[in-house]
Amino acid sequence: DLKPGAIAERNFGLFKPDMTMVYDVGLLKSESATPAPISTAPVTPTTPAPISTAPVTPTTPAPISTVPVTPTTPAPVTGTDKSWCVAKPDADPKVLQANIDYACGQGVDCSPIQSGGSCFTPNTVVAHATYAMNSYYQLTGRHSYDCDFAQTGFLTQEDPSYGVCVYQAT
């Protein structure tokens, strides 16, 4: 900054102390701009709407609860209750494939749903996603939010295991 004066004065901002612009950044209208035309048409006043004299019935607002609500993190399913995470059969196959890719990338053993694995058959994206999603759900602590998968999974108490394909439930 090559302006003379104290630092505070040299760095005043967009305007000089006499309020002329230091930098033209388009904040003010250009002096060469023509002002908007002023209408010379007569203005007709309008009559305001009449004020209602009907009695107003006051409404009582709903009572506000004074009991504090503390949000809690869902606890994992404990005890003898077993639960499994399964894919919704009507879910978008592309989303289910993304679920498989995600779960298998997070440390889930997906070898049973690969060719020759115990859960490869039936070779459908829903069956493979169910296995991967359930394995992820079990691995991450069995919290309900670990089975959401963009709303393509749900929890069940019915064991989805079949034949030699055993779904983990800890």
Image: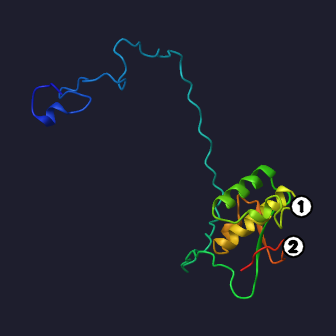
Report whether 162 appears left or right of 64: right
User: What's the residue at 81%, 78% (across, down)?
Assistant: 157
Report whether 65 appears left or right of 148: left
Report whether 39 appears left or right of 73: left
Nearer-the-camera pick, 9 or 134 = 134
User: What's the residue at 75%, 84% (across, down)?
Assistant: 81
Residues packed near mark 1 inside 10 Å, few (<14), some (14 to 19) or many (20 plus): few
Residues packed near mark 2 inside 10 Å, few (<14), some (14 to 19) or many (20 plus): few
Label 1 and label 2: CA atoms lie apart by 12 Å
Answer with mark 1 or mark 2, whichever residue precedes in sequence: 1
Q: Is residue 42 above or below residue 136?
A: above
Residue 138: x %, y % from top left: 69, 73
The residue type indicated by label 2 comes to Val
Residue 30: x %, y % from top left: 36, 17
Quadrant housing residue 57: bottom right
Residue 46: x %, y % from top left: 59, 32
Nearer-the-camera pick, 22 or 75 = 75
User: What's the residue at 89%, 61% (across, down)?
Assistant: 122
Question: Which residue is label 2 attached to?
Answer: 164
Quadrant housing residue 107: bottom right
Question: Which residue is label 1 attached to?
Answer: 122
Residue 136: x %, y % from top left: 69, 67
Q: Is residue 32 above or below residue 17?
A: above
Tag in front: 1 or 2? 2
The residue type indicated by label 1 comes to Pro
Report whether 82 appears left or right of 74: right
